[in-house]
Image: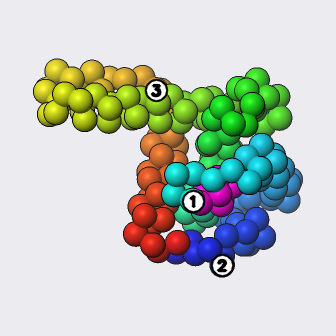
Amino acid sequence: MVTPSTLSLKNLLEILPSNINVTAQHRISEAYNFAKTAHGSLTRESGELYIDHDLAVAQIMAPLDVDTDTLITCLLHDILLPHTNVSVANVEQRFGSEVSSLVTSLNKLQEYAQQTQYTQKTKGAIDKHELEVIRQAILSIIEGDIRIILIRMADCLQDLRKASGLT
């Protein structure tokens, strides 16, 4: 389990899958430093630093033997928030089109989830038609790439751990 004492780039690099070579480790380090600089000392609603949350998500995913771009995306998944002034083009230029696409899809999924939560709070129960619309939207957003759902699940898991006081 990810605990505050294990949250560091060094610990992430130590638990990387064996298929991650030195060049990939440098890319992961670069993504961490980029995200840390972009977020600065800003915190999430939970009080957790953005970079600590992103690092925890990456540490949740690392034991799953995911690829380098997935781990980089974990570190950058909050990077398009308004406080960073980072654009999709910045992400693509530094980390490539695959990472940029994953980050963009995660951002869209998050926005859609927030919109759906608001609709549910204001309208009450969601009917079958609305559920089908939600399902179609999610499928459209993930575009067949399961990594988006896996990262989002790790993101939610970290939020739950933080809320329950486990991290």
Give the percent coordinates (x, y) of residue 66: 60, 54
Magenta part, dominant SS: helix
Residue at horizontal 46%, vertical 57%? 159
Is 121 displayed left or right of 74 in the figure?
A: left
Q: Which mark is residue 90?
A: none
Query: Are circles 3 and 1 on residues that touch, CB within 8 Å?
Result: no
Type of the residue with mark 2:
Ser
Query: Relative to the observer, which residue lies in front, 59 or 51?
Result: 51
Residue at horizontal 38%, vertical 28%? 115
| Residue 154 visible to the viewer | no
Label 2, label 3: how many angstroms apart (C-alpha)? 35 Å
Residue 50 is one of the magenta-drawn residues? yes
| Label 2 Cα crowd, 10 Å radius (few <14 / some 14-19 / many 20+) | few
Q: Residue 47 carries which label?
A: 1
| Label 1 Cα crowd, 10 Å radius (few <14 / some 14-19 / many 20+) | few
Magenta stretch bounds: 48-54
Is 152 displayed left or right of 21 in the figure?
A: left
Query: Relative to the observer, which residue lies in front, 63 or 160?
Result: 160
Residue 35 is one of the magenta-drawn residues? no
Q: For mark 2, give the secondary structure.
A: helix
Image height of 3 relative to 47, above or below? below
Type of the residue with mark 3:
Ile
Type of the residue with mark 1:
Gly
Along the polypeptide, which appears first: circle 1 or circle 2? 2
Label 3, label 1: how many angstroms apart (C-alpha)? 29 Å
